[in-house]
Image (cartoon, rainbow, N blue to C red):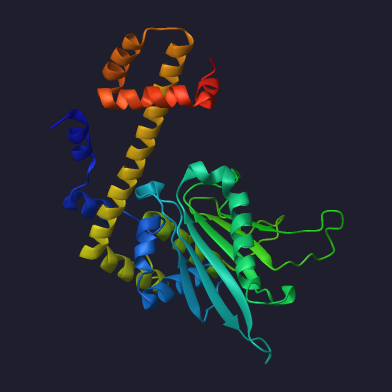
Amino acid sequence: MNKNNQQDKMERITLEQARKSISEMNLINGFLFDSTLEDEDDAKIIVGNILKAVFFREFNIRSITSQKPIQAIDTKYHGIRLDVKIDETEDGKAPTATIYDIEMEDRQSDRKYLPNRLRFYNALYDAKLLESGDEYDKLPDFVSIVILSYDPFGAGDMYYEAMSTLITHPDIPYENGIRNIFLYCNGMPNFDDPNGKISLPPEHSKKLKEMLKYIVSGEKPILTNIDIDEIDTIVTRVKGREEVTKAYMRQWDRELSIKRDAKNETKQEDAIKDICFDIEHNIPIEITRKRLKENFGYDSNTIDELIKQAKENKELVLNAGI
């Protein structure tokens, strides 16, 4: 077995390692959050209880749509997104629809992209709705809730909210139906700031803090919180499912494959740049071949192909800076 095959074997995760990794996950982890939503009834409980903690009221959930991009695993697993459509009736009027977009975010490297990413998501959803022929005034309100393990804006607070405003005339309402909420699980509670606009009743503040603490750490409050207990029952059951463990192992292998492909592509680009440099500086081709074999581990056929690419693609020569 060659060195590369040995390395691949070392990188693969075993069944026991996968089980251990899953057992240590909390709901902030995208893979676990995604897995707990496979069953629609479970999803309605989890999402309903999270929304209840955020807004301090019950929700009658009509439908849940999980958005599943290809993503990494463990704490690097990119946030899974949920589109939750809720129809509500007020004062005997016809039901009005609101879309609640929920995302778990555990990658601090994504911090600087959050505002633009939410802008992109909002535009995607609006475009999808308008394709059905709806007029602009038929667009439902859109509430985005991002639950984070890191501080998205660096103020150290637990609650951040962004809405569109008329900057020149802040007292005039500017209603476009979009509301973005960011909840930093380990932040300082800022719900009772007398100088701010956030004012939550003590019981609401308590329930939300408990929910966020459970999401990021798995720790339940000392006094019983029924909503968290319901979620924890589902989480515990999902962690023990064999198909979840196997799905984690498959995701692990997919990520390794992506990393290998990226590594091989970078390695090939570096080799071609070396060839271009040698050609430009009239270094004998045999010296180039020897270096490619020793430094990159390429065989003769691969080296021939790389030399051919370097000679044919003049843009690569220019991009090499020679």
- Please tell me which residue is depicted at 53% across the width and 58% down the height of the picture: 146
Residue 128, given in percent of the width and then of the height, sits at 60, 69
Front-most of residues 116 and 239: 116
Residue 290, given in percent of the width and then of the height, sits at 28, 13
Front-most of residues 209 and 129: 129
- Please tell me which residue is depicted at 83% across the width and 58% down the height of the picture: 170
- Total count of labels: 0
In the image, residue 11 sits, relative to residue 180, either above or below, namely: above
Question: In the drawing, does residue 157 fall left or right of residue 300?
Answer: right
Is residue 160 visible to the viewer in this orientation of the structure? no
Residue 60, given in percent of the width and then of the height, sits at 51, 82
Question: In the drawing, does residue 125 fall left or right of residue 23?
Answer: right
Front-most of residues 252 and 115: 252
Quadrant location of the N terminus in the rendered image: top left
Q: Can you name the residue that lies furthest to the left here?
A: 1
Is residue 234 visible to the viewer in this orientation of the structure? yes
Residue 231, given in percent of the width and then of the height, sits at 37, 69
Question: In the drawing, does residue 317 fall left or right of residue 89?
Answer: left
Front-most of residues 204 and 113: 113
In the image, residue 126 sits, relative to residue 322, either above or below, namely: below
- Please tell me which residue is depicted at 20% across the width and 38% down the height of the picture: 10
Residue 122: name its quadrant: bottom right
- Please tell me which residue is depicted at 40% across the width and 30% down the height of the picture: 266
